[in-house]
Image (spheres, rainbow, N blue to C red):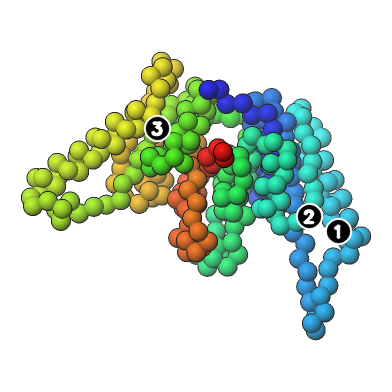
């Protein structure tokens, strides 16, 4: 099934940091002849003084919205693609998710600061919330370091696509999407499954049997990965499978660097709020260990 992207949404906070996401979104819109919705959301807080609550005045809100519109219009005026601005107020992640549904968005694009530690715990992450709430695939880009040169993307050049698969329904959707993108870009596809370390010697009585068990597990996982690939895929795509041992986010990150991966595709697996705050998702942790874009794919809602 061919990937069809008709409507792209890119969320920006107007910073130089998020310009990398806009660059990617423009390149995607150009590649697929899609319409780009450039979105900026003001989350206007209230504040209190001596027990009295104060809100931004309507005129102040209008000035902020007009400033954002002017800045984004200037940015887009020379772009030869179809585009439309979405500038409004509200909770950022929830408003972006709602806009994605209303505009029938096929893919959203955001940049992430990839916070860690206490900053992540107390400040949260708009991107992390979007991963769990948005109804379309979410492309998350990590801007390069300041000394890495220009962050403008002239065109998409995905030569190697990695799909993380844990054999859950979420990851099957990611495999399907990754294969579709590999066909679109004539890219190689790497299907990777990671199992956490197991002391096989505690399961069986001899080290020889433990090693045999480990080998059999890896071989069966590789066969299961290959079974996810339609037969005709091998006619146009080079397929590689790998079963690794370790923490999934660490092994996927290392594999991506070693094999010069241009795009990582991950399925979304929901965690409850406590797990999210203290542990983070595999997708979120992969983002902290790679410089290539990560595409978070949700299951189709029935």
Q: Who comes first in sequence, dot 2 or dot 1?
A: 1
Residue depth check, mark 2 versus mark 1: number of the one nearer the observer: 2
Q: Who comes first in sequence, dot 3 or dot 2?
A: 2
Q: Quadrant of residue 31?
A: top right
Residue 61 numbered mark, or none: 1
Closer-to-camera residue (153/282): 282
State the image coordinates of residue 275 (x, y, percent, origin top left). 47, 61
Residue at 69% x, 41% y: name it.
101
Badge 2 is on which residue?
89
Q: Is 142 drawn above or below residue 55 in the view shown?
A: above
Q: Is 282 drawn above or below residue 164 in the view shown?
A: below
Closer-to-camera residue (204/288): 204
Q: Is residue 270 left or right of residue 75?
A: left
State the image coordinates of residue 166 (x, y, percent, origin top left). 38, 42
Closer-to-camera residue (70/178): 178
Instruction: Determine contact: label 2, label 1, CB under 8 Å.
Output: yes
State the image coordinates of residue 125 (x, y, percent, origin top left). 59, 57
Badge 3 is on which residue?
190
Q: Is 199 drawn above or below residue 51 in the view shown?
A: above
Q: Is residue 293 visible?
A: no
* Cα–Cα span, label 3 and label 2: 41 Å
SS under mark 1: helix
Q: Is residue 48 visible?
A: yes
Q: Is residue 132 left or right of residue 73?
A: left
Residue at 15% x, 56% y: name it.
202
Q: Is residue 267 left or right of residue 252?
A: right
Residue 91 numbered mark, or none: none
SS under mark 2: strand
* Cα–Cα span, label 2 and label 1: 9 Å
Q: Quadrant of the C terminus?
A: top right
* Cα–Cα span, label 3 and label 1: 48 Å
SS under mark 3: strand
């Amino acid at each position: 099934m061919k990937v069809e992207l008709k409507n792209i949404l890119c969320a920006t906070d107007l910073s130089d940091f998020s310009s990398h996401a806009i660059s990617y979104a423009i390149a995607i819109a150009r590649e697929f002849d899609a319409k780009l919705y450039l979105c900026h959301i003001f989350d206007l807080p209230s504040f209190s003084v001596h027990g009295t609550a104060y809100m931004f005045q309507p005129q102040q809100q209008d000035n902020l919205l007009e400033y954002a519109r002017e800045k984004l219009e200037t940015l887009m005026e020379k772009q030869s693609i179809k585009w439309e601005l979405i500038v409004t107020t509200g909770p950022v992640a929830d408003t972006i998710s709602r806009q994605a549904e209303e505009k029938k968005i096929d893919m959203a694009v955001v940049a992430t600061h990839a916070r860690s530690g206490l900053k992540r715990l107390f400040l949260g992450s708009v991107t992390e919330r979007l991963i769990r709430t948005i109804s379309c695939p979410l492309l998350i880009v990590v801007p390069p370091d300041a000394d890495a040169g220009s962050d403008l993307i002239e065109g998409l050049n995905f030569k190697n696509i990695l799909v993380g698969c844990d054999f859950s329904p979420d990851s099957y959707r990611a495999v399907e999407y990754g294969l579709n993108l590999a066909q679109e870009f004539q890219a190689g596809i790497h299907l990777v499954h990671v199992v956490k370390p197991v002391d096989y010697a505690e399961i069986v009585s001899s080290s020889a049997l433990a090693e045999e068990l480990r080998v059999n597990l890896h071989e069966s996982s590789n066969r299961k990965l290959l079974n996810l690939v339609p037969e005709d895929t091998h006619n146009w795509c080079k397929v590689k499978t790998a079963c690794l041992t370790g923490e999934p986010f660490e092994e996927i990150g290392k594999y991506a660097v070693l094999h010069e991966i241009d795009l990582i595709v991950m399925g979304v697996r929901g965690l409850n709020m406590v797990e999210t705050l203290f542990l983070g998702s595999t997708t979120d942790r992969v983002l902290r260990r790679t410089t290539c874009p990560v595409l978070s794919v949700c299951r189709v809602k029935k």
